[in-house]
Image: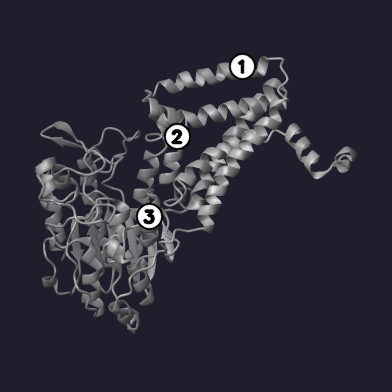
Amino acid sequence: MSPDMRKMGPLPRVGRFLKEWSLYPWLFAIFPVLDLYARNIKETAPITMLLPLALSLALALLVWLAARAVSRQSRKASLTTLLFCLMFFSYGHLSVLLGLPPWTVYLWAATFLFAAFIILRTHRDFSVWTPRLNIFAAVLVIFVAVQVAWAWTHPSSHTPSLTQLDEDARLSERNLLPSGMPDIYYLILDRYANEKVLKSEFGFDNSEFLDFLRAKGFFVAADSQCNYPQTHMSLASSLNMDYIDRAQGERAAGSGYVYQLLKDSRVLRLLRSLGYTSIHLGSWFEGTSFNPYADLNLGGAGIRRYWNDFFQKFVGTTALRPWSSGHFFHPRQRDRILQQFAELERMPARRGPKFVFAHVLVTHPPYVFGPNGEDPGTGKGFTYLDQLRYANARLSRLIDTLQKGSSPPPVIILQSDEGPKPGGAVVQVKGKKRRIRWSPGRESPEQKRVHHPILNALGFPGADMKVLYPSISPVNTFRVLFNLYFGTRYRLLPDETRDSSGEGAFDDTAE
């Protein structure tokens, strides 16, 4: 510290610091990430910010170094970096707001280069702007940081807590021998269509795969429907053996509460109390990407843990939006699915008993597999049915591997959380491509007929399958499983499809 600085009081020192040091480029680089996190804080873990923050600061640093090399002046480099941040992080928002075509990103880049040229070649002194921009950027970041801190220190009053059932306590008190407990595989095939929907809407006969399942001892619930038409609600319901509004005792309080129920679920707690090791294979979807309550997380390790729903949203807000799906996301989707299947096929070698949860987006957009597993490169060219055929082949091989390699025979549950969402599925009927359109909000009866029916195949070896019935839904899956294998007497709930707020059942008879 210089003698002049030592003579100053605290406030003058801060003023001189703000005047001489350009902090604003770095504050503007982190602000978009913090802002996006603050607006999605109920659904997003803090760790998901790490990759976007690192990339934002790295890009800002590269621009600053390049501008500094050209101008040889730090203030001009800082102002150029600020301009880059403003334009780079605003393009995605403007693109959505104004409906800009993808080619406008090149016009946007040319505009930045022209403006940067003017800043770097001008003889003006920008020192007067440094303290003002520092203060403005600091206020923005502090404002968002306070929102985040408040959310962290004042969690929702709707703290996740499950209604305690007598059967839960009774199950926890049982002293079961690990050698007699089967491994349990709960495989969620996102948006895998029901057999009747595949035939009527897609023109596809799925009987070969379903007959294979029946030959392997599965009960295929032909009339099963999802309990909620959204992934986080559907999975939270099935993993807690209850409807969300019943489990909470009142209306579901937003997706933050539901995400917590999904991860710290009743099923997970009960199986761990019995001595099961819980293994989690997540997807890019934030609700299942990583589960801190599981004993082991696979398929989401390393960079895959951060390349998730939040990161995709972040990239979509930037000037990288035109490439945010194909170049950035499709290869990661394919790699993760391949890793999930590879991990699942190695599971019999792990000592049990174990409860394996896998959320596999193999029948969910983007379509990155051909019917024989071909790599599309850019993610274009394949359809829902192509990927479904590949899923059937991999699942058949997986089931053979799990059943042959496990003793005692494993419990295997194949379920979709929801059917294909109209608007997200491109199908090919009689040689022609057809897109089923879906509008958000309340679904029409026709949309329900596509979206609500699901695949539900239950492999309960050695158990009395007579208790199963064609319309059994996921909310009753683990109630039946615990009754069959662990001597509980859970009563079965009505099989309903409720809306995503948990307020009540859909009226499927409405015209």
For marks 1 and 2, the one nearer the N-term is 1
On residue 288, the disc is 3
For marks 3 and 1, the one nearer the N-term is 1
- The crowding category of the residue bearing disc 2, from other C-alpha atoms within 10 Å (few below 14, some 14 to 19, many at least 20), is many
Q: Is residue 274 left or right of residue 225?
A: right
Seen from the viewer's position, the closer of residues 124 and 421 is: 124
- Of circles 1 and 2, which is in front? 2
Position above or below: 181 against 318: below
Where is residue 143 shown, x and y percent of the image?
Answer: 57, 43
Q: Amino acid at mark 3?
A: Thr
Q: Quadrant of residue 20?
A: top right
Where is residue 29 shown, x and y percent of the image?
Answer: 58, 36
Q: Are marks 3 and 2 in contact (CB under 8 Å)?
A: no
Mark 2: secondary structure? loop
Tell me the quarter of the image containing the N terminus: top right
- Identify the residue at image location x=65%, y=24%: 67
- Identify the residue at image location x=27%, y=56%: 502
Mark 1: secondary structure? helix
Mark 3: secondary structure? helix
- Identify the residue at image location x=43%, y=27%: 94
Q: Amino acid at mark 2?
A: Thr
Q: Which residue is mark 1?
A: 117
Where is residue 24 shown, x and y percent of the image?
Answer: 64, 34
Q: Is residue 211 left or right of residue 277?
A: left
- The crowding category of the residue bearing disc 1, from other C-alpha atoms within 10 Å (few below 14, some 14 to 19, many at least 20), is some
Q: Quadrant of residue 320?
A: top left
